[in-house]
Image (cartoon, rainbow, N blue to C red):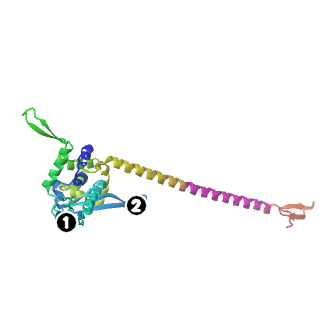
Amino acid sequence: MHEEIQRIIEYPDRRIKSLVLTMCSSGIRLGAWQYLKWKHVEPIRRRDDRGEDRIIAAKIVVYAGENEQYFSFITPEAFNALQDWMEYRRTSAVDINGESWVMRTIWDTTTPRRSTIKCPKNMSQGAIKQLMKRALDSEGLRSSSLNPNTNYSQRRYEFKTNHGFRKFFQTNCESKMKSLDVMILMGQDTGLAASYNKQTPDMLLVEYLKAVDNLTIDMTRMKQQHQDQKMLDFAKNQQDLVTQMHMKDQEIRGLKEQIEEIRYMYEDLIKRNTVVTNMTTDGRIMSATDGWGRPL
């Protein structure tokens, strides 16, 4: 499935990558795009081991303002694709703000001053369906075959367009998360179970992060990120080891100094308590000296 989705997002339309990756990593329905504005996509950052802010996911508000409103999350990969798409529009003299529709109709890029750029039109559900169909056809994920019973050509769908993305999300999340949490992120009715599973957004985020690797399509990039993290961890461990060895050296030097001081004190004590006493035969003390021959 990952390979098929990778082929779809290579279709030469700047919108397709952000569309597909968002749907695959959030499980939203096709109709949700008609309500999604840029202000409804909120990146979530955490500080990494190097002290840098890193996007770990993004929260999206689905069907904002409607009775069916709920929230879900998307992967860093999907958020970056959305951000690239919005940045492309900004560089085309489009005013991008929180009220901007995330998905809009395309414009004539050869005449950037046309009014259609300044007045974007929200992309309809039907238009998104047609875009998905063209991408699937272009990548050979839809083909025709002869039905042996009717001798008529029939379509064979290797990938079910929009429901397939939602199913991809559900399958890959349920292998890492509880089914009830997955249902919440998909906006499904959980019935009475919701009373016993009062998950906060932060709690759901923790669960969602467990499935991010499964939901990431570009595995090459993910493997590189993992490799970079391993190198970072190795370097940190090496630095910790050097610090520990330095501390041990200091402890050893301190112990040596303490031992040397104790030895000196011991020798001094012996010298001070060594008394050479010469006594006469009748028991009188003739002379008494300390360890250095000085009279007491």
Magenta stretch encompasses residue 265: yes
Q: Outermost residue, top direction?
A: 148
> How far is disc 1 from disc 2 in space, using C-alphas?
36 Å
Q: Are marks 1 and 2 in contact (CB under 8 Å)?
A: no
The amino acid on which the numbered mark 1 sits, given as a three-letter code, is Lys
Q: Which is closer to the viewer, label 1 or label 2?
A: 1
- Is 257 or 129 nearer to us in this picture? 129
- Is 184 or 114 nearer to us in this picture? 114
Q: Is residue 60 left or right of residue 151?
A: right
Magenta stretch encompasses residue 116: no
Element type at marker 2? loop
Q: Which residue is mark 2?
A: 52
Residue ID at (15%, 56%): 31
The amino acid on which the numbered mark 2 sits, given as a three-letter code, is Glu
Q: Which residue is mark 1?
A: 118
Using the rendered view, name the quadrant where residue 119 is placed: bottom left
Q: Please tell me whether the stretch drawn in magenta is mainly helix, strand or loop.
A: helix
- Is 257 or 90 nearer to us in this picture? 90
Is there any visible trace of residue 252 in the rendered image?
A: yes
Dot 1, how many residues are within 10 Å of its Cα: few (below 14), some (14-19), or many (20+)?
few
Using the rendered view, name the quadrant where residue 90 is placed: bottom left
Q: Outermost residue, left direction?
A: 150
Element type at marker 1? helix
Dot 2, how many residues are within 10 Å of its Cα: few (below 14), some (14-19), or many (20+)?
few
Residue range highlighted in magenta: 243-271
Q: Looking at the image, is mark 1 or mark 2 earlier in the sequence?
A: 2
* Res. 225 mark: none
Residue ID at (36%, 47%): 223
Return the x and y of residue 94 as percentages of the image width and height: 23, 64
Quadrant in which the C terminus is drawn: bottom right
